[in-house]
Image: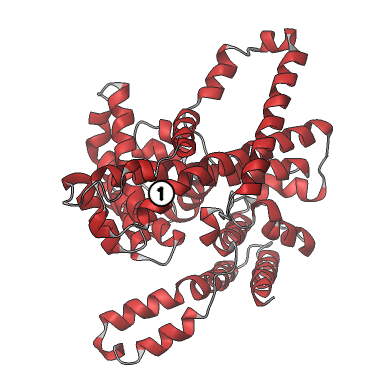
Amino acid sequence: MQYTLVLLASIFITYIFGYLLKDKTKYSVFLLFLGISCNVFLLVYFKYSSFFFRVIGESVPFFAEVHQSFVVNFENVHLPLGISFFVFQAISYLIDVYRQDSPVEKNPLNVALYIAMFPQLVAGPIVRFNSIAKELSQRTISWDKLTGGVSLFVVGLSQKVLIANTVAVAVDGIYNIPLAEMTAPLAWIAAVGYALQIYFDFTGYSNMAIGLGLIFGFHFPANFNYPYWSQSITEFWRRWHMSLSRWFKDYLYIPLGGNRHGKLRTYFNLWVVFLLCGLWHGASWNFILWGAFHGALLVLERAGVLRVINQCPRLIRHLYCLFFVLICWVPFRAETLEQSVTIFRVMFFGSSASSLNWPVASFVSNDVALAFIFGIIFSAPLWQFLQEKLFSVKTVARHTVLYQTCSNSIVVLLFFLCILSLSSGAHNPFIYFQF
């Protein structure tokens, strides 16, 4: 109950300050700062308090004797579900109202609906207020939206249940073995597996959220566009978690100066933005390291590496991007910095551990291998390609009934397989629920 009050507090703060910002006055900047600060305080208190006190206590000798009591107290503070997402939506609303990019919503229930909308509340996508402002009070529900939303929901459910959950069996098993017994093949399988797991886990949730929104008459933005098909890290971030990337670009990167103040300032802004992006994902040095890696790669590409990469064949560009994305996923998945460093060492320099202790076959069963294959296939825009080549407008017009029958049959089959998997499997929550 107390964590529901956190959500209600964010709604109340956002509505009050948004209403006060409807008219530009000499106090508008101060009101904007105050409204953002109140929301950020909620996020910092519940998500980062324990981490910050631990870091300060371990780094500053003066606090060495007393920091433990603070850490213990803040360890009892739990993370409210979806706080990283609804706080970011609240901040975007306040800034857009201040910039006059969005209308002021005078109805508090509509503000509450915007921030607490259940389909995308806990893991996105992050929705801008102006994209659904009209639909909050005037929206239509039709049979086409209902069937389209149900189909998209089932596709997302199958991505999560049939691919992400199945691949997670191998990934979790490998990460649970003792570090001293980790072998290079297992480390690389875990890296590839986690790349597939987190993609289908998160894009699955996003599709489910978008599908549910469509059923109720809302149009949420797409959150993924085949990111593993990218040919650079820059392109990867245009395709991965697009609503978050746009949020950081519009509300942090550009206000910091963007690319308007010379190369060095641009590089600094990029790196800081992705450092904070890593911290947004969690209060851990591993997430900070992940953000710093991506920030450094983006800086290098902007500094000239991208020009060199673009001169390479398409396959080389794909492999370059996939290699560094896989490397960066290691600290994102690892529980400690020690585990990250050990896995990096094993991946590139091998280990003295015997593969007989933990053979690959003990982690990669037939089901897992099949999930790997389908995950790799469907992480590429295969369906989009088939639609363009085989299901042109003229073809669909001639065979509408056949096309609909095949599509509906696939959706029903996927739903049936998901039910079978869920009825026999263990609880496996969405990865981004922890953020």
Q: Is residue 339 above or below residue 1?
A: above
Residue beneath the point at 27% across and 51% down: 357
Closest to the observer, 355 or 58: 355
* Residue 338 placement: quadrant: bottom left
The colour scheme used to paint the residues is: secondary structure
Residue beneath the point at 66% across and 41% down: 420
* Residue 104 placement: quadrant: bottom right
Residue beneath the point at 39% across and 45% down: 363
* Residue that carries the numbered disc 1 in the rendered image: 171
| Residue 242 appears in view | no
- For this view, does 398 lie left or right of residue 26? right
Closest to the observer, 366 or 197: 366
| Residue 354 appears in view | yes
- For this view, does 314 lie left or right of residue 236? left
- For this view, does 204 lie left or right of residue 346? right
Instruction: Indicate the quadrant containing the N terminus: top left, top right, bottom left or bottom right.
Output: bottom right
Secondary structure of residue under mark 1? helix
Closest to the observer, 434 or 181: 181
Amino acid beneath label 1: Val
Residue beneath the point at 23% across and 36% down: 305
Percent x, y of residue 43: 53, 69
Percent x, y of residue 265: 29, 53
Label 1: few (<14), some (14–19) or many (≥20) C-alpha neighbours in 10 Å: many
Q: Is residue 214 above or below residue 72?
A: above
Percent x, y of residue 70: 42, 87
Percent x, y of residue 64: 29, 88
